[in-house]
Image (tube, rainbow, N blue to C red):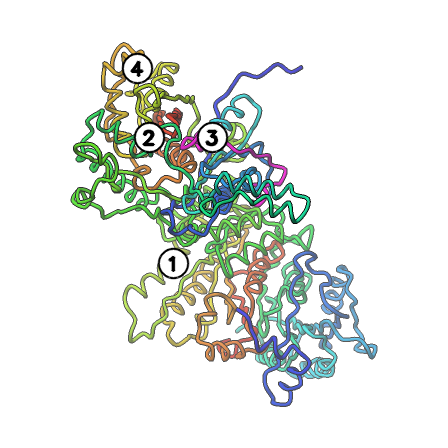
Amino acid sequence: MNDTYLDAVSTDVGKKVAKKLGLPQPVRLRRTDTASPDAPLVTGPVLVLQDAWSRASADAVAERLLGWDLDVRRDPHLAEHQRWGAVIVVLTELEAPGQLGGPALDLGEMLRRLAPSGRVITLSRAATGGDAPAQAAARQAVDGFLRSVAKELRAGATGNGLVLAEGLPVEATSVIGALRFLLSARSAFVSGQLLRVSTPGGQAPADWTRPLAGQVAVVTGAARGIGAETARVLARDGAQVIGVDVPGAGDSLSTVMNGVRGSALQLDITAEDAGARILEHARSRYGTLDVVVHNAGILRDKLLVNMTADRWNDLLAVNLLAPLRMNETFAAPGALGPAPRILALASTSGIAGNRGQTNYAAAKAGIIGMVQALAPRLAELGGTANAVAPGFIETDMTARIPPVARQIARRANSLNQGGHPVDVAEALAFLASPQAGGINGQTLRVCGQNLVGQ
Amino acid sequence: MTPTPAPRRAAVIGANRIPFAKAGGAYAAASNQDMLTAALEGLVARFGLAGERLDEVAAGAVLKHPRDFNLTREVVLGSSLDPHTPAYDVQRACATGLEAIVGVANKIALHQAEVGIGGGVDSASDAPIVVSDRLRAALLRASRARSAAERVKAFAGVRPRDLAPVAPGVAEPRTGLSMGEHQALTTARWGITREDQDALALASHQRLAAAYDRGFFDDLLTPYRRLDRDQALRADTSLDKLASLTPVFGKDGSSPTMTAGNSTPLSDGASAVLLASSEWAQGRGLPVLATVVDAQSAAVDFTRGDEGLLMGGCYAVARLLDRQGLTLDDFDVVEIHEAFASTVLATMAAWADPAFCRERLGLPGALGEIDRDRLNVTGSSLAAGHPFAATGGRIVGTLAKLLAERRAETGRPARGLISICAAGGQAGAMILEAA
């Protein structure tokens, strides 16, 4: 789990050597302080830029940010000793590609003054078939622009975009909610992503640092790794958490769940009645169930030429068929609380493919299809279904990858390092939160802008 | 002053144990405190009790290091429970766990507690080793010494042979006989055959294995130190294999019958049972598995009288049934702790014997017989192992769940009986009911 290269280049000498040799220069990312989340939300002043047509929207965004006591600037002048905590570029009213140059070049002038783990965030609109060709071109141009900016950033800074549905105001709860997530340390390992906000749904939480207060959440595969961390982050954000894992992992499960004052349910999720038993446990103990995180998963890597039916079937049963079957229970009307959230773990392997992982990638791509199809059903119930696709994350699972392959996998992203389980957990917690109610059917990558896939 | 409320029945909410290991096996490096903490933490997690203040935690160990004088409280302090949870230690030999549960259940019955945990732990691997009396006296003298010279002088009387450690005795102090040798006398007295003992042992293994296979223990057990099933369990054992073992106890007699296969192995393990008032359970949305109806302890005079050391259960059960106006036929499930296969068989033979029941139990005739289909239906100590003080919690948890299952299947109340024999001629009995 230790990234010794990252440790080495974090020293003064290591930093110089890496620079001289042109080696990757990863830095320690700013992550949420569990004792005081979101303090500070960003590390410096926040600059809001816009194209000439989006000024009103940019004003609205700036006003919202002021509500969080941020140092919001509309003027790019910055005192010598200061660094931008974030630069937000509002491009929602772009009508033609020619209008992008101004704000793009303005942003360019700011990049040298971006703080470590700083943020670049674009707000734009989804290009659709109904747009005039020039408008669609302008809107889609933001996509390529942002992804390239993110690759140019250094020192743990990330670039991400919010893509708003036509007509959705920038003040919509989920736009502001997502903006906050992307500004904060919670999104440390999310970069190069364009997250779609499709509806005005969602609610601002009473306390932004505990958005899940009063919610009951279940996490499968909670005994270790990403699942354990997800239980911790959901609990930190105020949720009452139920951890599920196979009986054989009961000892680590009980340690994790006692640590978050939750409860442990030893259960094989491939059992016919797994969904019903989880729902029953949640309802009898806590009265309701609001959030489901399908995290449990296994690996059965083999090249397809050597694949056995057992390896294929076991993996599909746990990683895809079990969530599908359990959702028959969870997505039924009245099963979950008034704003249900179904979340599942996809993978960059399911997006870009990965040699030796035909079964895993099929299952993880299946998860992406699953949440897309669940989204309209959950919307009818006042909720959402989304997936998070981790890239290379430092876990016990990836620690078993041979050292050289592991080093390559770690550096093959814009942040030149592996993510931590908490990074995935933060993304799941955000999508579970009430302020993300307008984000539905999406797959958010947490991969440090992995070089492969979208 | 508020009037004293009427007694109520304590409810068994759930239980947890770690798999039992063979002595010197998977838990060889674990202490009693480690194991009891693991069992308690699993229970806390199952019922979401982290950070909660319970009214009482009672537990104990039969083989206990002097440093563990406050074992249960230390375990609570090292657990996720609120450190304001009080705790006390109990010891009644192999009935320690049951006694701890009775104590907590009684406090709940008398409204002195709303929720508590009873349990026990034992390690045959990490047994306390004691120094000789002469060396101990010298060490104490030395600790009181005021000068180096006095300290040296304190050891003057110590001889080399005094330096050898004294292993904990498993023999009865008053007779010098081991528990197995005592039971061999009882086995012969009741004419319990080798075949019967081996058949009972086989059933124990087969039933315990089947219970594991159907997931019965998924919510009664938390894995520990890479063990997720009892180490003594031999799912593939057979009558032939059991018949091939050489007798280890009663070898002075004409035809010894007790082997390692039909006697419990020395074991390490821990268990804990969550008890509460029905109101507490309801408030938490926790279903009640069963309620504690009544309990009874008894002891026999095995030193001067002619009763068998492990026959106390006969007496405890007889008194319990008499008080409750019940017969053996009134129980859906009966759990008789399998210290030895012949203990169970001799106990049942005695209950079926009119002369014994008249003369010893003061009954008008035989107490009755127990259909084997109702006896130790998910196996018992022969297959699971028997970490002395942990057995009570194992049996109470298992029986409570069996009764809840039975009630769910039949829609009728189910009643269960427990009998646990213990060293010193003692025994404990308990009635549980799923109403």
Front one among A331 and B64: B64
- Specify whether residue A92 is in view: yes
Q: Residues within 10 Å of mark 1 (few under 14, many from 20)?
A: many
Front one among A23 and B20: B20
* Distance between the alpha carbons at the discs numbered 4 and 1: 60 Å
Both marks 4 and 1 on one chain: no
Quadrant where the N terminus of chain B sits is top right
Quadrant where the C terminus of chain B sits is top left
* Residue marked by disc 2: B335
Q: Do the residues labelled 3 and 4 touch (CB within 8 Å)?
A: no
* Distance between the alpha carbons at the discs numbered 2 and 3: 16 Å
Q: Are marks 4 and 1 in contact (CB under 8 Å)?
A: no
**In the image, farthest residue toward the right:** A79
Tell me residue A8's x, y (percent): 61, 78
Tell me residue B386's x, y (percent): 36, 39
Both marks 3 and 1 on one chain: no
| Secondary structure beneath label 3 | helix
* Distance between the alpha carbons at the discs numbered 2 and 1: 38 Å
| Secondary structure beneath label 2 | strand
Residue A67 higher or lower than B408, as above or below: below
* For marks 4 and 2 on the same chain, the one whose residue lies earlier in the sequence: 2
Tell me residue B306's x, y (percent): 30, 20
Both marks 3 and 4 on one chain: yes
Write the start and end of the magenta stretch as one range. B76-101
* Residue marked by disc 1: A318
Q: What residue type is labelled 2?
A: Glu
* Residue marked by disc 4: B360
* Distance between the alpha carbons at the discs numbered 4 and 2: 22 Å
Disc 3: host chain: B
* Residue marked by disc 3: B101
Q: Which amino acid does label 4 sit on?
A: Arg
